[in-house]
């Protein structure tokens, strides 16, 4: 049996934090925040795997546990078959980590950031310099080895972080929201680089809240929210699970519950959901039902402030599972 690159079983993480400001009524101690609530995942060797979810969904906590920075409250997490709690040193030898925001040593020049990092893994300096220059070449930074880190753009600094993560040739590469803050061109350049590394057979695990990023890069995606796994499959299969038809989203000038109630059962609508002032309806032929939906909202005493149409997608699946947008 082939050992999975990553496996979690009933993984749970609860943070205890002091209540903000004055204690609430009946509350005299710390507040428990459940970041992960029984997460089960399995990632195959050589797979490009994505954790997709909004901010606060538990993605960064999951990466923190798998990279030994965060201790789980309960459950198990194995990386390359090694338990992250009982043998963290062995796990660190097998992984490379790219943090959410670049954190290079700004007192060092670019190539020194890689060479010094290689020393943590017992690499001789001559070999480290050779590997560092090769990685800089691969990242398009071959001529920037002698530059100060602050002379690099945001995209270049993120590529430097990837090079640093790869200096010891890890089995698994973790990237936590790797394109946050990058301009569109830098993001596309980084996507191409990740595709190249995956094509070479490396296991990549990436967290993101960008649906297009997950859709275009990942072989499988786990959708998580509030620390729970909602769905896990290929992008194509996940999109096929989205509610049928186009999602028609009407933003009203107040609570949409009454309008949604009147719209349910309307001919041509497959499903009607409501969240606050937003009425979401699904229809195979949106053009035929849009006008009647607007009339229904007006009959309920609400004016339509905005209209948005969306074909079946990861976003429509996420909204159908959680009742909220992926933001």
Image (cartoon, helix red, strand yellow):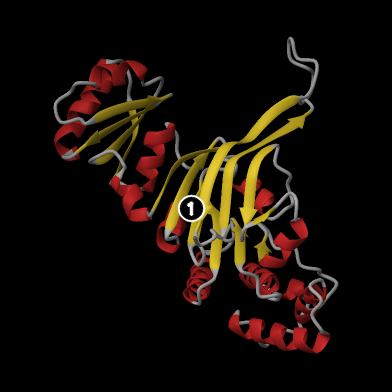
x, y (%) of residue 185?
Answer: 50, 69
At horizontal 35% and vertical 48% (from top left) the residue drawn is 238
Q: Which of the pair 263/97 is nearer the observer? A: 97
Vertical placement of 285 versus 297: above or below? Answer: below
Q: Where is mark 1, residue-wise?
A: 210
Q: Residue placed farthest to the top in the image? A: 26
At horizontal 70% and vertical 63% (from top left) the residue drawn is 102
Q: In the rendered view, does 178 fall on the left or right side of 234?
A: right
Q: Could you tell me which secondary element the residue under label 1 belongs to?
A: loop
Task: Tell me which corner region of the image, top left, top right, bottom left or bottom right, holds residue 305.
Answer: top left
Q: Residue placed farthest to the right in the image? A: 107
Q: Which of the pair 35/150 is nearer the observer? A: 35
x, y (%) of residue 152?
Answer: 69, 74
Q: Is residue 70 in view? A: yes
Vertical placement of 110 versus 4: above or below? Answer: below
At horizontal 63% and vertical 72% (from top left) the residue drawn is 159
């Amino acid at each position: 049996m082939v050992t999975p690159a990553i496996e979690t079983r009933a993984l749970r993480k609860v943070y205890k934090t002091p209540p903000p400001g004055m204690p609430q009524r009946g509350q005299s101690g710390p507040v428990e925040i459940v970041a992960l609530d029984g997460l089960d995942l399995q990632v195959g060797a050589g797979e490009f795997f994505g954790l997709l979810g909004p901010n606060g969904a538990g993605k960064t906590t999951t990466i923190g546990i798998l990279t030994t920075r965060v201790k789980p409250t309960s459950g198990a997490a194995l990386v390359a078959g090694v338990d992250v709690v009982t043998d963290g040193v062995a796990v660190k030898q097998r992984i490379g980590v790219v943090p959410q925001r670049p954190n290079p040593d700004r007192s060092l020049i670019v190539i020194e950031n890689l060479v010094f990092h290689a020393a943590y893994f017992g690499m001789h300096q001559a070999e480290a310099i050779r590997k560092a220059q090769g990685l800089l070449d691969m990242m398009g930074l071959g001529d920037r080895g002698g530059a100060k880190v602050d002379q690099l753009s945001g995209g270049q600094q993120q590529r430097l972080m990837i090079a640093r993560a790869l200096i010891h040739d890890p089995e698994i590469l973790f990237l936590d929201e790797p394109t946050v803050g990058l301009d569109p061109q830098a993001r596309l350049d980084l996507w191409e680089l990740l595709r190249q590394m995956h094509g070479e057979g490396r296991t990549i695990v990436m967290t993101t809240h960008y649906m297009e990023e997950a859709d275009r890069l990942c072989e499988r995606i786990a959708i998580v929210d509030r620390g729970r796994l909602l769905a896990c499959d290929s992008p194509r299969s996940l999109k096929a699970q989205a509610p049928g038809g186009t999602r028609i989203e009407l933003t009203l000038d107040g609570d949409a519950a009454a309008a949604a109630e009147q719209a349910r059962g309307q001919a041509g609508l497959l499903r009607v959901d409501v969240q606050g002032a937003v009425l979401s309806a699904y229809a195979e032929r949106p053009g035929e039902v849009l006008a009647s939906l607007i009339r229904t909202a007006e009959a309920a005493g609400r004016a339509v402030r905005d209209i948005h149409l969306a074909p079946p997608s990861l976003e429509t699946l996420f909204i159908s599972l959680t009742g909220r947008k992926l933001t």
